[in-house]
Image (cartoon, helix red, strand yellow):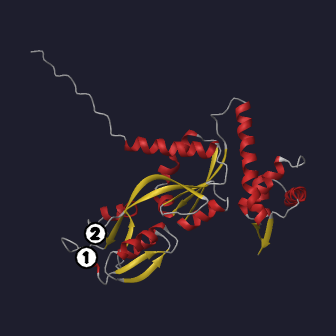
Amino acid sequence: MIGISLRQLEVFAAVAGEGSVRAAAGKLHLSQPALSMALAELEAQLGVTLFDRQRGRLYLSERGREALPLAQEILERTVELKRSAQGRSDVLDGELRLGASNTIGNYLVGDLLGAFAAAHPQVSIRLAVGNTDAIVKGVLDHALDLGCVEGAVVHADIEVRPWRDDELVICARPDHALARRKRLAARDFAGARWILREDGSGTRAMTERILASLPPGQTVLELGQSEAIKQAVIAGLGIAVLPAIAVGDAVKAQRLVALPTPFLDLRRRLSWILRRSRYHGALVGAFLDSATRSDMAALKPPGRTPRSRRNTRG
């Protein structure tokens, strides 16, 4: 065990994250033969095979999945030790691999990254955008340091931390029959033509709960992006449940109408997800602290402007 080097652990973590020797070699600025040799030496010292090869990609073996969190912790603690020894604990660098589900990644990226990126310019942030299931998988596979999702997540090895509330709306074209009604009731949605997000997305899961409380309708289309669904609704192909933040511009331009549905609860919670069995170092901690502070600042009511004193001189 004494012969294991930090470079070998870096190679192991890079291959696990990139999925190929070529990509990992490029990330670490090593030749592919040098990287392959370092990985082989690590496997020889551990006495296990860390990866299985399938269709030209490397996938963590069972032993590799067990070893990766420990290797990542050693690397992260080594970086923290160096910063502490140099008296630079407040100066962060390195790479933060963040995953965000589609609504968050496409419409809230400024809220998600702005304050942290400005405060820590030496940190490289890699943002992966996908549906909730894809982000959960990335966190579980150690490909992502943490994720931010809009769907409910229940998994024994996933820790969920609430971030902020979000709201959905049912939207339609302004000339749609439902948009022309002054008041709506659940029964008015009988036979409605629905456009849905794909399976695995948080918006799809929420939509299915909403549809369960409405009369049966017809699913006419399934699409993988909120923007595509928005355009389909504008084209008159059906109605849809979409994040309010995604349709605000179209509603303002009177291309869409958000239907009034006080009989439905369209609120949901956006959350951070982290892998329980993994060590989360200073980068992740600082990022979550920054996101929390930014949200608190946004929710704080503006201070009152002091009233100017009235001139009492005659």
The answer to whether residue 95 is above or below residue 50 is above
User: Contact, CB < 8 Å: mark 1 with mark 2?
Assistant: yes
Report x, y in % for residue 170. Answer: 33, 70
Q: Residue at x 28, y 31 (%)?
A: 305
- To which residue does mark 2 refer? 259
Task: Say above or below: 18 vs 204.
Answer: above
Is 231 left or right of 280, judged from the image as shown?
left
Determine whether the residue tagged by mark 1 lies in a helix, strand or loop.
loop
* Neighbourhood count class around disc 1 (C-alpha, 10 Å): few under 14, some 14–19, many 20 upward: many
Q: Which of the two residues, 86 or 136, is positioned nearer the viewer here?
A: 136
Residue 8 vs residue 33, the one in the foreground: 8
Residue carrying label 1: 178
Q: Amino acid at mark 1?
A: Leu
Between discs 1 and 2, the one toward the N terminus: 1
Query: Residue 270: percent from the left, percent from the top?
Result: 46, 57
* Quadrant for the C terminus in the image: top left
- The residue lying furthest to the top in this view is 313
- On the question of residue 115 being in view, the answer is no
- Residue at image x 25%, y 78%? 188
Left or right relative to 44: residue 266: left
The amino acid type found where label 2 is placed reads Leu
